[in-house]
Image (cartoon, coloured by chain):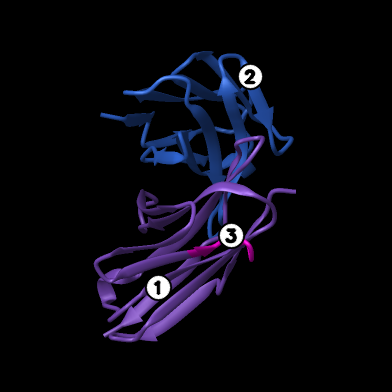
Amino acid sequence: SQTIHQWPATLVQPVGSPLSLECTVEGTSNPNLYWYRQAAGRGLQLLFYSVGIGQISSEVPQNLSASRPQDRQFILSSKKLLLSDSGFYLCAYERNTEAFFGQGTRLTVV
Amino acid sequence: KNEVEQSPQNLTAQEGEFITINCSYSVGISALHWLQQHPGGGIVSLFMLSSGKKKHGRLIATINIQEKHSSLHITASHPRDSAVYICAALFQGAQKLVFGQGTRLTINP
């Protein structure tokens, strides 16, 4: 069956520290992968999407980057977190118009 | 530009009322998803539409491709329906999955 794993579920990090959030997909191949962020009280904003290994499109210039080292792995990173990076981060994948969503990561930068 | 607009942003109703949430998108799509987000943030997929109408229990979703518009209806609403409802459009070409800003629904007993 098709599943998507995203971890960790919650994370508290100090300002200036690095970030790595990982998302992996099972049960499918060559999915389109997405990272979103939701600030408090706001909607889900598309940050990055990828249609293949090593192919990353950035929607919003910011302090974050994404990588896709393998077909079913999508990583969201930052070298130095800012307070404004706090929020809810969601990974998703789409394959043949069906979409599946991770459980999300609630990041608090302190 | 690939945009998705939802209305209303907030909706409060009494138990039993018929609820309608609207979603409009800017350009051609491959599919439109209706999702439910609970307070913890988890996303539940309700419907995936590319044309016509789908029904699941008290939930009905419709899409008009020509008008670039979709609606989510809830019949006989119940307090447990209270959540944020989100539409997400999969845009053709770039294959971008873009979310609307969500509609916060509160059903009072």
Q: Which residue is mark 1?
A: B73
**Would you say residue A3 sits in the magenta stretch?**
no
Taking the image as shown, residue B92 lies to the left or right of residue A87, namely right
In the rendered image, what is the letter of the chain coloured purple?
B
SS of the residue under disc 2: strand
Residue B85 placement: quadrant? bottom left
Q: Identify the residue position indicated by label 2 in the image.
A: A55
| Displayed quadrant of residue A23 | top left
Mark 1 is surrounded, within 10 Å at the Cα level, by few (under 14), some (14 to 19) or many (20 or more) other residues, namely some
**Circle 1 — which element?**
strand
Measured as percent of width and height from the top left, residue A1 is found at 25, 29
Question: What range of the chain is rendered magenta?
Answer: B63-68
**Comes first in the chain, label 1 or label 3:** 3
Q: Position of residue B16 (x, y in %)?
A: 28, 86
Please name whichever residue, A30 or B67, is drawn nearer the observer in this view of the structure. B67
In the rendered view, would you say A70 is above or below B32? above
**Image coordinates for residue B63, horizontal then vertical, percent:** 51, 63
Q: Amino acid at mark 1?
A: His
The structure residue drawn at horizontal position 50% and vertical position 23%, both measured from the top left corner, is: A74
Between the C-alphas of marks 1 and 2, the distance is 38 Å
User: Disc 1 vs disc 3: which is toward the camera?
Assistant: 3
Q: Amino acid at mark 3?
A: Ile
Taking the image as drawn, is residue A110 in sight?
no
Residue appearing at x 31%, y 31% in the figure: A3
Colour in which chain A is shown? blue
Cα distance, mark 1 to mark 3? 17 Å
**Residue position for label 3:** B65
Above or below for B102 versus A83? below
Please report the residue visible at 33 percent of the width from the left and 23 percent of the height from the top: A26
